[in-house]
Amino acid sequence: MNIRQNISLKSYNTFGVEANARFFVEINSLDQLDMALRLKGYPEKFILSGGSNMLLTRDLEALVLYINIKGKTIVSENGDTVVLKVMAGENWHQLVLWTLERGYGGLENMSLIPGNTGTAPIQNIGAYGVELKDVFEGCQAMDIHNRSLRYFNREECKFGYRDSYFKNEGKGKYIIVSVTLRLSKANHNLNTSYGAIEAELSQQGVDEPTITDISKAVISIRQSKLPDPDKLGNSGSFFKNPIVDFKTFDRLVKKHPNIPHYQISQNSYKIPAGWLIEQCGLKGKRIGDAGVHEKQALVLVNHGGASGKEVLDLAYKVMAHVKETFDIAIRPEVNIIK
Ligand code: EPU
C-alpha cells in the first residue's frame, strides 16, 4: 500500500480549505480497502470520498482512506427498467450524464450535484423534487471493524430529508462501496412540477420534455445560482431547511404573508433557510474570505483564503442571527470535522 505522509487536502474538499492529512492512502479496489482497514499502527481512520459535503476545520492525524473505487455494471434489465450497480468512487454527475446518454431515466433532476456516488445515500441527496431514495435499490457497505460486506436495502437505509441510517445509528460503522439504482428505459416518470424547472422549460419553449431536456434545465438553474466549486469553494447547501410546526408557521405567515414554504404534513412545514438568511440581510455577507453566497443564501463560500474555522465561525453567526430574528434553529447539513 502506498501510504503517503503530510498530504494537503485542499484539492480533496470542494470548500477548498487548507488542511493536512498526516497519513493518506488511495483505495482503488475492495481488496485494497480490506487491506487498509487491517493496517496496524493507524488506530484512527478517516473516510474521504468526493469531499463535497464536509468542512475541515483542522488537520487530520488519522490515516485518510481516499475511496476511489470505479466501475459500473448492469445487474439486470428488461424493456422498461435497468438495474445498475455503481462503485462508490464514480463521480455523481458523470454518472448522471452516462445514464442519460443511454436513455436511462431517473437521475435527470439530480444533475450537477457535486460529489461521488458512494456518499449519495449518506445524506439521501436530492434536488428539484427528486431524492436518491426514489431510484435507490440498495447499497453494499464494508463494516469498518470486521471488514465483512453487508447489503442494505432501501428500508434498511432509513432515508429521510437529507438523512439516513448512515448519519445516525450507522455513523462511523460502514464504508459504502457500491450503490444499486433502478432506472427507467421507457415510460419515464418525469418530474417537472418544481417551479423553477417549469419556468426554465417554458422559457426554452419545451412543451414535451425528455429526460435530457430536464437535465439541461436543472443544469441551467443550478449554474445560475449555485457556485461552481472549481471556481468558488463551497459545499452546496450549508444548512438544512428547517421543519417547523403549525404554530410556528402560523406566527411566521402572519408577519410575512409571502413566506415560501412546503407543507409536509398537517402539522409540519418546511421553510427555506435561504429565505430566512436573506431576510436577515446576510445574503452576500463576507467576513474575510468566508461568505454567504450572493445568489443563494443557503450556500456558504470560500472566496479563496478562508480557513475551515473561519467558515464555521460565519456559519455560527448566521445561525445565531436567524435564531434571534425568527426564533428558528437552523442546522448545518454539511459534515463538520471539528
Ligand atoms: N430563497 C430566497 N433566498 C435565497 C435562497 C432561496 O428567498 O437566498 C427562496 C427561493 O426564492 C425559493 C425558496 O427559497 O422560494 C427555495 O429556494 P431553492 O429552490 O433555491 O431551494 P432551497 O430550498 O434553497 C433546496 C436544496 C438544494 C436543492 C434545491 C432545489 C436543501 C438544504 N437544499 O434548496 O440542495 O438544489 O432545494 O431542489 O434542501 C444541496 O443540498 O447542496 C442543494 C443545493
Image (cartoon, rainbow, N blue to C red):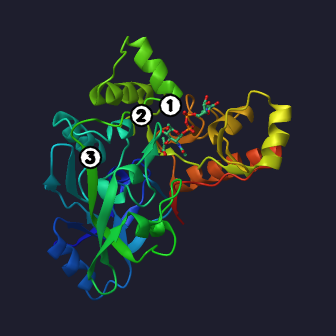
Between 54 and 151, the residue placed more toward the observer is 151
User: Which residue is at a point 33% across and 50% down the rendered structure image?
Assistant: 11
Q: What secondary structure is marked by label 2?
A: loop
Which amino acid type is shown beneath numbered disc 3? Leu
Residue 45 appears in the picture as rendered? yes
User: Which residue is at a point 27% across and 51% down the rendered structure image?
Assistant: 182
Q: Is residue 116 above or below residue 190?
A: below
Dots 1, 2 in contact, CB < 8 A: yes
Position of the C terminus, as image quadrant, is bottom right
Tag 2 residue: 191
Residue 290 appears in the picture as rendered? no
Would you say 256 lies left or right of 172 here? Answer: right
Q: Quadrant of residue 189?
A: top left
Q: What secondary structure is marked by label 1?
A: loop
Q: Is residue 97 above or below residue 34?
A: above
Q: Assess mark 3: CB under 8 A from ligand 1?
A: no
Tag 1 residue: 194
Q: What secondary structure is marked by label 3?
A: strand
Tag 3 residue: 183
User: Residue 286, percent across and down?
Assistant: 62, 37
User: Which residue is at a point 83% across and 48% down the rendered structure image?
Assistant: 247
Q: CA distance from mark 1 to mark 2?
A: 8 Å
Q: CA distance from mark 2 to mark 3?
A: 14 Å
User: Which residue is at a point 52% across and 58% down the rendered structure image?
Assistant: 160
Between 124 and 133, the residue placed more toward the observer is 133
Q: Assess mark 1: CB under 8 A from ligand 1?
A: yes
